């Protein structure tokens, strides 16, 4: 007689997944400044909950590791505990049957190496390192450390002038950052615990769209100090430094080699992303302080640098990274092969290329590559292809930029490593030849591409744009005597150039190519340190009061994202692509801010992080 089988009772794993989503949100919103050993302990505890209990190293080793780590966290451990932890972690990692034990051991070992100073502080001094503690996530993650909750509240109240001056307290480029900032401030937003990060850049954009920055008076400068500072470079870092020094009462002369101010914001970002007149709004406001003289089209070589160093009380070198890196490819010198920096620089001066009817290939996967590709579409190219040797998800360009490029008809040829450029009889580029890749082991945080056993592919390319990075023209300053490493100026923690008392450096020429907001943050720090070097300690008041907080609205909302004009329309011109946020959308986004400056972290007055 046949036996009927009984269906097992189904388990609703979706409930568990939904519940665990709350924890993933908490991980995303982990605040900066938290003790790394506490974070490690929580990760290790979650690993222990996942053990099946079959193998001894994982089953018994993880709880023992967790006990020792908690001893360290409570500052009750000595050096012998650290030795035992490391030995046991190696055993758990190397002898466990599955990835649960391996990862648990690796978490401990990597943490002990990465946070060696923190472990030493806990064991030897019985305390966390200086600076560990609760901070405002958005303000801490912003390289310029702008008081973000304050200007969000001011925008929500309709005080756009107050919001702009609150931003200017730490960042004199409110318009620039409203339009092009990569918004790292949003990465740890506590609103993630409820729904999604507040659209901080969108709120800033609404404020500067509602009232242009050059219509908002800047604070009045302090009393004239009689000091005169030279700034080499009129980009975001140099002009930021000049702005704060001028408000402190110092006289500033800016030396800029281009026809206009703005640095890579003008000569590296196309107008469809950042219209030139919007950049001019910020620069006009900066120059309105009255203590800044600008010398355009002035190249500073070694001899001129010697004169400047002698004549001025202090010098800030912020020359950016205006040269394009190249590749060792056969045919790299062919006609039609251009540097991304070269073509974007020409666009910055209003010299737009004409690629009508031509096939354009862009080599690279960063924001500059996307800017070049999207500019080529607007220049009339019949087809545009981006050749990138890694995967789409490995691109360093912002995901929104990649998506916008694809909407405009740009083809992403990923896992394709360029090997040569083929030319016609006249030496003009005709094809880009690529070797297919497959993705291999992780190196330096990203999976590395490896050549695949596949035939080469051909990409039609009358124009090849090389967008693989920017370089620093440091040679004149090296000749003057400034030290560099890989062309980046060497400086101490106060941005003072090595071997000099009165010369400071910052921005891309010191860190390598980074974002505009990081350059702005460096300029702000340099201004404060130059002021201290000159014997002063100026305090700048933006003249705006921080609004009192309203009760939190903890209902979940959909995040308001900034839309772009339809791709079929925007790809035909260099006009600005983003659509304005409406008043209703802006009010909703401002209302989503949890005012962590008053709730959760508590007020930061007196405890506000200072960066010098």
Image (spheres, grey):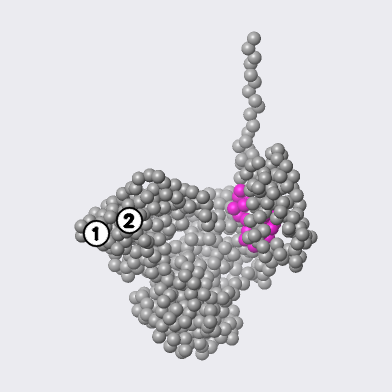
Asked if residue 40 is among those painted magenta in the image, a careful observer would answer: yes
Name the spot of residue 212 as percent of width and height, x first. Answer: 43, 68
Q: Which residue is mark 2?
A: 420
Quadrant of the image containing the C terminus: bottom right
Q: Position of residue 371 (x, y in %)?
A: 38, 59
Return the residue nearer the eye: 500 or 579.
500
Q: Residue 168: horizontal and vertical position, in percent?
A: 51, 72
Residue 94 visible? yes
- Residue 428: mark: 1
Quarter of the image for the N terminus: give it: top right
Q: Nearer the viewer, residue 332 or 140?
A: 332
Residue at image location 64% in from the left, 20% down from the top: 6
- Residue located at (65% from left, 47% from top): 94
In this picture, residue 542 sits left or right of residue 48: left
At a point 28% along the width and 51% down the height, the residue shown is: 460
- Where is residue 68? Give x, y as percent: 75, 54
- Element class at badge 1: loop
In the rendered structure, which disc, 2 or 1, sits on the residue that comes first in sequence? 2
SS for tag 2?
A: strand
Q: Is there a contact, CB below 8 Å, between mark 2 and mark 1?
A: no
In this view of the protein, can residue 386 be seen by the observer?
Answer: no
**Tag of residue 522:** none
Predominant SS along the magenta part: helix
- For residue 239, above or below residue 553: below
Asked whether 563 or 163 is in front, the reply is 563
Start and end of the magenta stretch? 23-43
Residue at the (29%, 63%) spot, across then down: 333
- Disc 1 residue crowd, few under 14, some 14–19, many 20+, Cα 10 Å: some
């Amino acid at each position: 007689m046949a036996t009927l089988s009984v269906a097992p009772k189904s388990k609703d794993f979706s409930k568990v997944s939904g519940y665990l989503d709350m924890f993933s949100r908490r991980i995303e919103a982990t605040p900066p400044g938290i003790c790394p050993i506490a974070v490690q302990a929580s990760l290790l505890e979650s690993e222990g909950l996942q053990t099946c209990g079959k193998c001894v190293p994982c089953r018994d080793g993880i709880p023992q590791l967790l006990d020792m780590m908690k001893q360290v966290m409570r500052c009750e451990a000595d050096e012998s505990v650290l030795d035992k932890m490391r030995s046991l972690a190696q055993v758990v990692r190397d002898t466990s049957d599955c990835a649960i034990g391996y990862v648990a051991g690796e978490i401990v070992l990597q943490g002990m190496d990465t946070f060696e100073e923190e472990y030493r502080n806990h064991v030897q001094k019985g305390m966390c390192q200086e600076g560990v503690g609760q901070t405002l996530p958005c303000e801490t993650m912003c390289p310029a450390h702008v008081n973000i909750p304050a200007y969000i509240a001011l925008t929500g109240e309709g005080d756009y002038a107050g919001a702009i001056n609150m931003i200017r307290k730490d960042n004199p480029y409110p318009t620039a950052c409203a339009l092009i900032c990569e918004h790292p401030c949003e990465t740890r937003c506590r609103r993630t615990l409820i729904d999604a990060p507040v659209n901080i850049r969108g709120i800033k954009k609404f404020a500067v769209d509602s009232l242009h920055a050059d219509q908002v008076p800047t604070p009045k400068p302090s009393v004239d100090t009689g000091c005169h500072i030279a700034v080499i470079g009129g980009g975001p870092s140099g002009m930021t430094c000049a702005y704060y020094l001028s408000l402190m009462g110092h006289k500033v002369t800016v030396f800029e080699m281009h026809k206009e101010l703005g640095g890579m914001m003008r000569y590296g970002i196309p107008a469809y992303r950042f219209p030139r007149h919007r950049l001019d709004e910020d620069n006009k406001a900066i120059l309105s302080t009255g203590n800044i003289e600008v010398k355009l089209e002035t190249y500073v070589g070694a001899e001129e640098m010697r004169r400047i160093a002698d004549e001025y009380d202090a010098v800030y070198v912020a020359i950016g990274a205006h040269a394009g890196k190249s590749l060792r490819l056969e045919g790299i010198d062919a006609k039609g092969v251009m540097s991304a920096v070269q073509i974007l620089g020409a666009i910055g001066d209003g010299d737009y290329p004409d690629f009508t009817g031509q096939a354009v290939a862009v080599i690279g996967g960063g924001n500059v590559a996307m800017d070049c590709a999207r500019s080529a579409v607007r220049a009339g190219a019949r087809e545009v292809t981006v050749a990138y040797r890694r995967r789409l998800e490995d691109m360093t360009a912002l995901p929104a930029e990649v998506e916008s490029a694809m909407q405009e008809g740009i083809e992403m040829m990923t896992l394709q490593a360029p090997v040569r450029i083929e030319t016609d009889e006249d030496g003009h580029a005709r094809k880009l030849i690529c070797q297919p890749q497959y993705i291999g082991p992780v190196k330096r945080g990203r999976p590395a591409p490896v050549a695949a056993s596949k035939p080469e592919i051909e990409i039609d390319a009358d124009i090849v744009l090389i967008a693989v990075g920017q370089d620093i023209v440091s040679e004149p300053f090296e000749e003057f005597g400034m030290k560099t490493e890989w062309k980046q100026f060497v400086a101490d923690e106060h941005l003072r150039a090595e071997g000099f008392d009165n010369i400071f450096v910052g921005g891309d020429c010191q860190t390598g190519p980074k974002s505009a907001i990081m350059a702005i943050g460096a300029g702000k720090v340099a201004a404060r340190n130059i002021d201290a070097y000159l014997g002063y300690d100026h305090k700048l008041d933006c003249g705006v009061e921080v609004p009192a907080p309203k009760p939190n609205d903890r209902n979940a909302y959909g995040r308001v994202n900034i839309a772009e004009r339809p791709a079929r329309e925007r790809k035909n011109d260099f006009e600005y692509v983003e659509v304005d946020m409406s008043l209703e959308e802006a009010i909703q986004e401002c209302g989503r801010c949890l005012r962590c400056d008053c709730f959760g972290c508590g007020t930061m007055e007196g405890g506000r992080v200072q960066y010098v």
